[in-house]
Image (cartoon, helix red, strand yellow):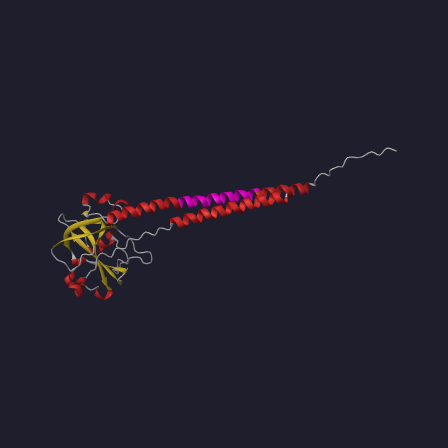
């Protein structure tokens, strides 16, 4: 009697089973692509922070050099249109003229000496133009000029200080109220218009610490501080990118193990 061995037949997969597998693979591929794109985006943010780090270090170096350099004449009217924050902010300058004390403006200030006001006064130059001078700080109880008459300098003066760019509209928390004469930032154009000062420079000068008669205003209180957390941010973004890639590798290995 002859026994015939038959071949084992493979049963074809049901259409629904094939469809489920294709759907699963598509979802897995989509998820993997999303993880790769997320990792790329996080790495790009890290690279951007590295670039910002280089820019910030260069800025700090440039400003430090300006602050400690010998003072130069403040830009004249012919050079006003060239004045800009990138090239001129915190440059030490000197200027001579006559203070218009009757047109001073008080701008709210919070300093190491406590709350009070910056005293902003126009300085009239020999050519008839004006530069707004931040003469320094006065406490709230001494904001009235009558209480600090000794500091109201008359006649020709020479002022040395740091060149600053105008601060339009107001501070981060408060807008200037021009009508009520309440100022929270040193908006050169608005202050000049309010006080009737024409031909005014588009920048102002923070006076240095040279003592004023009577001790007020107190100059030399300019705070130069550039937060530099870009390296921390870069490490954070790169670290997150590495974690996403690690998650992707873990998922792919898990799929191979269970396959």
Does 49 appear in magenta?
A: no
Residue 32's spot in the image, x, y percent? 54, 43
Residue 70: x percent and y percent? 20, 47
Instruction: Indicate the quadrant where residue 215 lies.
Output: bottom left
- The region drawn magenta spans 29-48
Task: Out of 125 and 64, give the one closest to the viewer.
Answer: 64
Can residue 194 be seen in this snapshot? yes
Where residue 99 sits in the image (x, y, percent)?
15, 55
Quarter of the image with the N terminus is top right
Where is residue 249 drawn, in percent x and y? 54, 44
* Snapshot quadrant of residue 86: top left
Compared to residue 54, the image places residue 225 above or below, namely below
Q: How many marks?
A: 0
Q: Is residue 73 visible?
A: no
Asked whether 37 falls inside the magenta stretch, the response is: yes
Residue that protrudes farthest toward the left in the picture: 155
- Depth order, front residue of 89/4: 4
Q: Which residue does the image show at 66% across and 41% down from the upper left?
A: 18
Dominant secondary-structure state across the stretch colored magenta? helix
Q: Nearer the viewer, residue 210 or 178?
A: 210
**Quarter of the image where the C terminus is located:** top right
Q: Residue at x 58, y 44 (%)?
A: 253
């Amino acid at each position: 009697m002859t026994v015939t061995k038959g071949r084992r037949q493979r049963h074809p997969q049901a259409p629904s089973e094939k469809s489920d597998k294709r759907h699963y693979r598509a979802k897995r591929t989509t998820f993997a692509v999303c993880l790769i794109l997320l990792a790329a985006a996080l790495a790009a943010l890290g690279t951007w922070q590295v670039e910002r780090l280089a820019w910030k270090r260069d800025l700090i170096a440039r400003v430090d050099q300006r602050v400690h350099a010998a003072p130069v004449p403040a830009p004249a009217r012919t050079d006003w249109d060239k004045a800009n924050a990138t090239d001129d902010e915190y440059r030490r300058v000197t200027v001579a003229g006559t203070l218009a004390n009757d047109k001073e403006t008080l701008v709210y200030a919070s300093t190491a000496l406590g709350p009070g006001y910056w005293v902003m006064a126009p300085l009239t130059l020999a050519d008839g133009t004006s530069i707004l001078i931040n003469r320094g700080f006065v406490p709230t109880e001494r904001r009235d000029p009558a209480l600090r008459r000794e500091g109201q300098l008359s006649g020709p003066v020479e002022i040395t200080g740091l060149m600053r760019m105008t601060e339009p509209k107001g501070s981060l928390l408060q807008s200037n109220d021009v009508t009520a004469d309440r100022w929270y930032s040193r908006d050169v154009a608005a202050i000049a218009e309010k006080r009737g000062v024409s031909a005014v420079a588009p920048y102002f000068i923070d006076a240095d610490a040279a003592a004023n008669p009577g001790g007020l205003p107190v100059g030399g209180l300019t705070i130069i501080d550039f937060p530099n957390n870009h390296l921390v941010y870069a490490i954070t973004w790169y670290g997150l990118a590495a974690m996403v890639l690690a998650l992707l590798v873990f998922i792919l290995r898990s799929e191979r193990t269970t396959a």
